Image (cartoon, grey):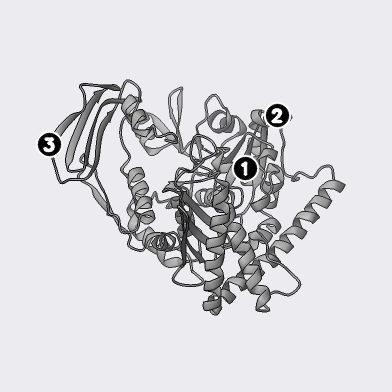
Amino acid sequence: GLHGVGVSVVNALSEWCEVEVYRDGRGYRQCYHRGFPDADMEEIGPSDRKGTFVRFKPDPEIFGHTGFSFEDISRMLREQAFLNRGTTFRIRDERTGREEVSRYDGGIVAFVEFLDENRRSLHRPPIYISGRKGDVEVEVALQYNDSYVENIYTYVNNVHTTEGGTHLVGFKTALTRTLNQYAKAHGLLKDMSLSGEDVREGLTAVLSVKVPDPQFEGQTKTKLGNSEVRGIVDSIFGEGLAEFLEENPDVAKAIIAKAVEAARAREAARKARELTRRKSALDSASLPGKLADCSTRDPEKTEIFLVEGDSAAGSAKQGRDRRFQAILPLWGKPLNAEKARVDKVLKNDKLQPVIAALGIGVGEGCNISKLRYGKVIIMADADIDGSHIRALILTFFFRYMRPLIERGFVYIAQPPLYLIRKGKVERYVYSEEEKDRVLEELGGDKGITIQRYKGLGEMNPEQLWKTTMNPETRVLRQVVLEDGIEADRVVTMLLGDEVEPRRKFIEENARFAELDIV
């Protein structure tokens, strides 16, 4: 915790807690129950061990669920292993016997290689720069790839600062300045300057600083506030990068060429946005023509359904509650945003209506405060095509409207898979497991008819409202971003250009797939 209360909070929320400390040749132990010590600290004799052991059991009277996720803890320890070069981290699940060991002698360079393993890099190995000024230590590893997204992960004293802070500002400032200076000095830029957005396209970077007295904004350690750290990072990284570029002209030219290409695309995107704005100013009906908007204007009370296909959208328009539900049809396959720059995204006829309807813009210009609806609900068929469309829309949101997902505005509608009838009894079911359970409840297959819904368009407006749109009876799945690093790797693997990682993933997971065979 921010104020050094971590073990105190663990103790307070545990049924029991035991702490052993080994230092200066001796060992010490104290035991607690529900926050209170059983006895004074006891000395457990001489020992050549070093370190601290904390054992605790979460209090079931406080927590409804006291299980631990092996995957979550393993990911956290893997991240720490990258940040602490040469340190071994072990996790063992005594429930199953599963065990993992994480150790990376390459440190944050290995971290960047791990993050970029599903992308084509412009240079190998990653650039590594480190330095120290006073008590502040700075480490940076960075690599450019052929994607159109930036991924910068920042850490202070091994804590992931998801909102950045002064260390990130120093890094970005030095990167933009140094690349511009090098490009102009070597005649690689003519009558233009590269923006920060240009030089960060396709960049994967890890920035780790050690600060003796960190000052964070807020209670969650997500943003560093120390003003002096900005200048230190700027100086150490800027000087190191300038030296690297001079010593590696081929890498420097490749990086500058990509940034120049990004600048041209940015200018094309600016013109596309300007054209859109001019049209909007001249045309009061600037919202997409196929949008059936709702009458309520309070975003907190409204929701928009992005519906696959005109047929289903027609039923949704008839079945909806017009006061707070808007419908926007999606036709055809949207652009794969993983393989597209922002200028192509803005020009794509499948994504333009979505961008216009939501009203928040894309990329660097994304402003979540302008969102026109409190829920954005993707409603697609329960088949392979529907899954593909959902994946493409989610990829677009993840790459160009990430705050939508981070702030919890995106949902997946859950249309029923089956309608089961027996006499006058009708039951809609949403999974194979639920189907088996309902059939058992109804006494087996005798006298039962089962209707399989392959598409949303097979339901009439009343059925669609009752099963998928009515807030009182529907099932929605909220899209959450639990691990940004893992999400980025999976999206790149499944929708990026590299075929081999995707083939490997399919081979390893094929047995878990739900096949849609006709």
Q: Residues within 10 Å of mark 1 (few under 14, many from 20)?
A: many
* Residue 461 relative to residue 136: left or right: right
Give the residue number, with chain letter if any, for mark 2: 298
Give the amino acid at mark 3: Gly
**Residue 256 drawn at (x, y percent):** 61, 72
Q: Splitting the image into 4 quarters, where does residue 443 fall? A: top left
Give 232 or 423, whichever is nearer the viewer: 232
Label of residue 45 in the image: 3
Q: Is residue 506 above or below residue 432?
A: below
Give 134 or 365, whichever is nearer the viewer: 134
Residue at 64%, 59% (x, y): give it.
197
Q: Are marks 3 and 1 in contact (CB under 8 Å)?
A: no
Q: Residues within 10 Å of mark 3 (few under 14, many from 20)?
A: few
Give the residue number, with chain letter if any, for mark 1: 306
Who comes first in sequence, dot 3 or dot 1? 3
| Secondary element at tag 3 | strand
Looking at this view, name the residue that lies furthest to the left: 45
* Residue 59 relative to residue 490: left or right: left
Who comes first in sequence, dot 2 or dot 3? 3
Give the amino acid at mark 2: Asp
Give 184 or 117, whichever is nearer the viewer: 184
Give the amino acid at mark 1: Leu
| Secondary element at tag 1 | strand
